[in-house]
Amino acid sequence: MQNVSAKITKGIQLGTRLKCADNTGAKELELITVKKYKGVKRRLAKAGVADIIICTVKKGNEKMRHQIVHAVIVRQKKEYRRFDGVRIKFSDNAAVLVNPKTSDPVGTEIRSVIAKEVIEKFTAIGKIAYMVV
């Protein structure tokens, strides 16, 4: 993993519902906490594109529902700026489920758009992605 090439505004906070962008069987996720978040006292954790989060599955098939899973955010509604001056924002918030130890994706395909900054940090997600912006 390496640094991303953008100044990502953290637009997703605790309790936010995210779409699951892969084919694991989960449909909707709720953010519980953000991995490696260091904040000041009593501040709620926030996350942005290419951050690893821990969430619970709210909607999906019977096997996946109510499980606690790790995920990587691939889209966010709040716009952020790349270093070349382009501002990027998506129409929804979405995440992809990953293995907690290796950060490899759990699903086999992502049939929607994901951000370029995710692939810079997690190359395995880029291999199964349908389209990258």
Image: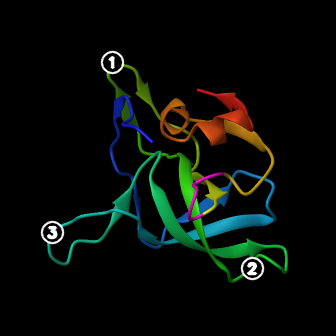
Which residue carries the number 3 mark?
A: 40
At 36% from the left edge and 37% from the top edge, which residue is drawn?
Answer: 3
Tag count: 3
Image quarter (top left, top right, bottom left or bottom right) of the N terminus:
top left
| Sequence-earlier tag: 2 or 3 | 3
Q: Residues within 10 Å of mark 3 (few under 14, many from 20)?
A: few
Label 1 vs label 3: CA separation?
Answer: 30 Å
- Does 18 sit above or below residue 126? below
**In the picture provided, is 44 more to the left or to the right than 31?**
left
Where residue 63 sits in the image (x, y, percent)? 83, 79
Label 2 vs label 3: CA separation?
Answer: 33 Å
Image quarter (top left, top right, bottom left or bottom right) of the C terminus:
top right
Residue lying furthest bottom in this view? 66
Towards the viewer: 94 or 34? 34
**In the picture provided, is 120 more to the left or to the right than 57?**
left
Type of amino acid under label 2 = Arg
Residue lying furthest right in this view? 62
Q: Residues within 10 Å of mark 2 (few under 14, many from 20)?
A: some
Type of amino acid under label 3 = Val
Which residue carries the number 2 mark?
A: 65
Given this view, does label 1 or label 3 mark the residue nearer the observer?
3
| Sequence-earlier tag: 1 or 3 | 3
| Sequence-earlier tag: 1 or 2 | 2
Which residue carries the number 1 mark?
A: 85
- Does 45 sit above or below residue 90? below
Q: Which residues are magenta?
A: 100-104
